[in-house]
Image (tube, grey):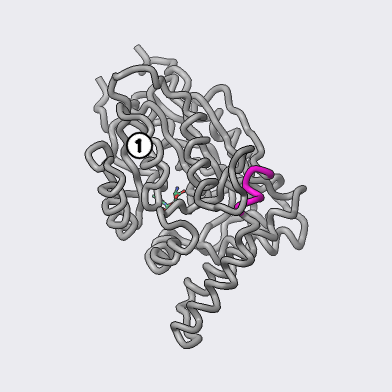
Amino acid sequence: MPSIFQPDFPLPRTPTAGTPHDAAAPAAITKADTQDYFTEVADDYRAWSPSYNMHFGFWRLGLNPFRREGMLVEMNRAVGRALKLDTGTEAHRCVVDLGCGAGATARTLLAEDPALHAVTVTNVAVQNRIAARLDAAAGVADRVAHLEADYTRTGLPAAQADGAWAVESACYADGTAKADFVHEAARLLKPGARLAVVDGFLLRPRPGRLAGWLHRLWADSWAVPTLAVRDDFVASLRAHGFEDVEVRSLRWRVAPSALHIPVLATRFALVELWKARGRLSPWRRKHIVASYCALVLGLFWRDFDYCIVTARRGRPTGPAAA
Ligand SMILES: C[S@@+](CC[C@H](N)C(=O)[O-])C[C@H]1O[C@@H](n2cnc3c(N)ncnc32)[C@H](O)[C@@H]1O
């Protein structure tokens, strides 16, 4: 009988795609850089979203494109729908957020489903402190646990989660296939449960010269090692036992919220530069640069897309399934 803290059947590790010559090849960004970045800019995200939705929005008919927060919350709902959770039941169900920020997605889903429980994972301590405060205000604190851990090695028990997601966080894992991240997601999910990943993706390992340069500037500025290459990521999901992999472009859904960037980032930069007498710390400066880059990167349709990728955890096969 395998320990619940161990994978219950062998999961292959896919090699990380990319050669040093690829524009998408991992740069020198480390996990420590990512942690420093998110620690330093933790308060800055409030300018984008008072409830700390640290992602782009999902526009649909009926939503006012000038109201950013409504679209950001709708992205959380889109993730919830993609998990296809059994909502008609009172049974205890538990979902996991891999790379949770201040836990906004879990708060939305928990507030709308009283039988749902969540574990959220971030490797940045201050985000969990912000999350705890917001959970209490939302009345969901008794159904959520915030774990400070690396999402590639959570230490959570295997095959217990009814669903898992990563919103704009899988990109922080190493390599263009994000194999370590996928490995841990596969380990945590119950057979039949779904993973939803919302993120930017490179559409080819060697983007055009300008798009490649912009991707590198954006990634360095937001402390991302590299975006996933879409096909590498899909192959990684399949290699780790995921089935029914579906990729849906959200390019047009996120565009209305992305168009908030120029005004918001410019106002933010001016106010913060004024307050700091022109001396913003390097990560805070890069945070502003990355915001503009994200908008421009979205114009390179041949090289870049913003997608939701969903996949169902297959049933274990082989000796360990017995
Ligand atoms: C852009 S934020 C998105 C946060 C959240 N998903 C949301 O949409 O509000 C990326 C998140 O991934 C987390 N993250 C990055 N690398 C991580 C890792 N190795 N382990 C756990 N969390 C990680 C960051 O700390 C941050 O919380």
Closer-to-camera residue (284/20): 284
Position of the N terminus, as image quadrant, is top left
Q: Position of residue 133 (x, y in %)?
A: 27, 54
| Image point (60%, 52%), residue name | 257
| Image point (25%, 43%), residue name | 141
Query: Magenta segment: does it hold 2?
Result: no
| Image point (43%, 61%), residue name | 46
Residue located farthest toward the top when viewing the structure as drawn? 322
Position of the C terminus, as image quadrant, is top left
Establish if 130 lies above or below 230. Answer: below
Residue on which the image places disc 1? 111
Q: Position of residue 291 (x, y in %)?
A: 58, 63
From the image, give the main secondary structure of the stretch colored magenta.
helix
| Residue range (magenta) | 252-257
Q: Position of residue 319 (x, y in %)?
A: 38, 15
Residue 112 seen in the current view: yes
Residue 158 seen in the current view: no
| Image point (69%, 64%), residue name | 213
Residue type at mark 1? Ala
299 sits left or right of 312 in the view: right
